[in-house]
């Protein structure tokens, strides 16, 4: 007899609960800001990806409203049929100019961008070599391809060299890495990875979800930070949902890449174009980051301060180099307990366990933003000090 739906659901959920891995998202009762209200409590928010504080920025909201009024609530179709509005094309040109690439194409989200680009580009007979800590959307994107898949050790150019030496291919060779790793906050050693890739004639593919708006001049991203933005053997993809504060994904590179994606990328062909308000907000976000360098300056000033103070309190931040600031607790239950205690103290910071991070490396991931004041950070640090002492985690 077949399994009933209810028994399948109950068995799956019981398994998650037994392992303490069941997720119950907290609910924000106000806009996503540095100080907000969550589940009825006023908190300092260290849980967002809203690096520059753009998610609720007045100038960005004003452009969203303007585009909404002028261009409507929805795009009305997929891009390839009747959904490409002039504002979509204009924003892609703005994004390509910002990225210093020949072209850019916007897709629904960063997640679908990896599926679309990897699924389009890679064919049987190709070789793809991927960092072991790459984002889930890269892993899923690679599942869509018939290319030979290999893994190299996290951020390790020597291991990449070994894998490329041991595996040849007549087709395209692609090295895939996050620009900034979303769980540890470390930066990929891009210069050395590209050097190794070139030795074997491989192209480098960088998912810069957490690097754009954070690294490089005016937030142009990790590839720009390392000086490879005009290289023809580097493909940049990323998201418009983190530092840019809204939603969307993009691929930036040679115009031929854009044209191929328009013709073949399934999330582009079969999913409706972004609504005008999204496009308006994004174009304002790109203007703002270039006009006002203070956003990035404050982001980095806050990042340095917060990390230094956590270290002084004796916490292990896993060598993070960016505003992503993990605090290691080890077992998942300890990280979740710390998160609950911090919340009771008015600090919203989320615990992450397996499978999001490796077993035994459960942590709370904090993301500092440009919007936090010194008072916000001091408030959070005082709570961390008390919780760390109570749970015997910090040595300081
Ligand atoms: C967040 C993230 C994505 C997904 O982006 P969305 O726009 O939220 O779908 C993809 N890749 C990496 C590395 C990410 O951190």
Image (cartoon, helix red, strand yellow):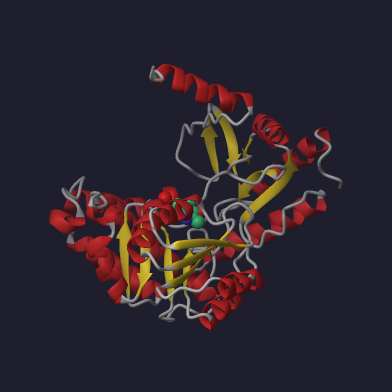
**In the image shown, does 160 or 360 lie closer to the viewer?**
160
Q: Is residue 36 left or right of residue 361?
A: left
x and y percentages locating residue 273 in the rendered image: 24, 52
Q: Is residue 385 left or right of residue 359?
A: right
x and y percentages locating residue 383 in the rendered image: 73, 38
x and y percentages locating residue 97 in the rendered image: 35, 75
In which image quadrant can residue 21 be found? Answer: top right
**In the image shown, does 241 or 8 lie closer to the viewer?**
8
Q: Quadrant of the N terminus?
A: top left
**In the image shown, does 221 or 107 lie closer to the viewer?**
107
x and y percentages locating residue 366 in the rendered image: 63, 47
154 shown above or below 393: below
Q: Is residue 251 left or right of residue 130?
A: left
- For this orientation, the residue located farthest to the front is 1
* Residue 220 in view of the camera: no
Q: Residue at x 22, y 61 (%)?
A: 87
């Amino acid at each position: 007899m077949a399994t009933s739906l209810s028994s399948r659901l109950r068995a799956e959920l019981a398994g998650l609960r037994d392992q303490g891995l069941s997720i119950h998202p907290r609910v924000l009762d106000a806009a996503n800001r540095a100080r907000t209200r969550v589940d009825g409590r006023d908190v300092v928010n260290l849980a967002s990806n809203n690096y520059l504080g753009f998610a609720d920025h007045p100038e960005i909201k004003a452009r969203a409203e303007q585009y909404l009024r002028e261009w409507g609530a929805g795009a009305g179709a997929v891009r390839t049929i009747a959904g490409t509005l002039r504002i979509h094309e204009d924003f892609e040109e703005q994004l390509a100019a910002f990225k210093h690439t020949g072209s850019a194409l916007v897709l629904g989200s960063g997640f679908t961008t990896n599926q679309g680009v990897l699924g389009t580009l890679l064919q049987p007979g190709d070789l793809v070599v991927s960092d072991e800590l790459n984002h889930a959307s890269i892993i899923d994107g690679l599942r869509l391809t018939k290319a030979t898949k290999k893994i190299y050790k996290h951020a390790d150019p020597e291991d990449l060299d070994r894998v490329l030496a041991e595996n040849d291919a007549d087709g395209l060779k692609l090295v895939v890495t996050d620009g900034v790793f979303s769980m540890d906050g470390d930066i990929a050693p891009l210069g050395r990875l590209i050097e190794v890739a070139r030795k074997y004639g491989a192209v480098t593919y960088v998912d810069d979800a957490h690097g754009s708006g954070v690294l490089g001049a005016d937030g142009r991203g990790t590839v720009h930070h390392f000086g490879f933005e005009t290289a023809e053997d580097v493909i940049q993809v990323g998201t418009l949902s983190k530092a840019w504060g809204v939603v969307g994904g993009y691929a930036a590179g040679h115009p031929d890449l854009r044209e191929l994606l328009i013709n073949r990328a399934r999330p582009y062909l079969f999913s409706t174009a972004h609504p005008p308000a999204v496009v308006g907000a994004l174009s304002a976000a790109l203007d703002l980051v270039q006009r006002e360098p203070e956003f990035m300056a404050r982001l980095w000033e806050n990042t340095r301060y917060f990390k230094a103070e956590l270290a002084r309190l004796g916490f292990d931040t896993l060598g993070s180099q960016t505003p992503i600031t993990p605090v290691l607790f080890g077992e998942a239950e300890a990280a979740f307990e710390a998160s609950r205690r911090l919340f009771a103290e008015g600090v919203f910071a989320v615990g992450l366990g397996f499978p999001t991070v490796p077993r035994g490396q459960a942590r709370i991931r904090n993301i500092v933003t440009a919007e936090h004041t010194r008072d916000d950070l001091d408030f959070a640090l005082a709570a961390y000090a008390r919780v760390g002492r109570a749970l015997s985690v910090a040595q300081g």
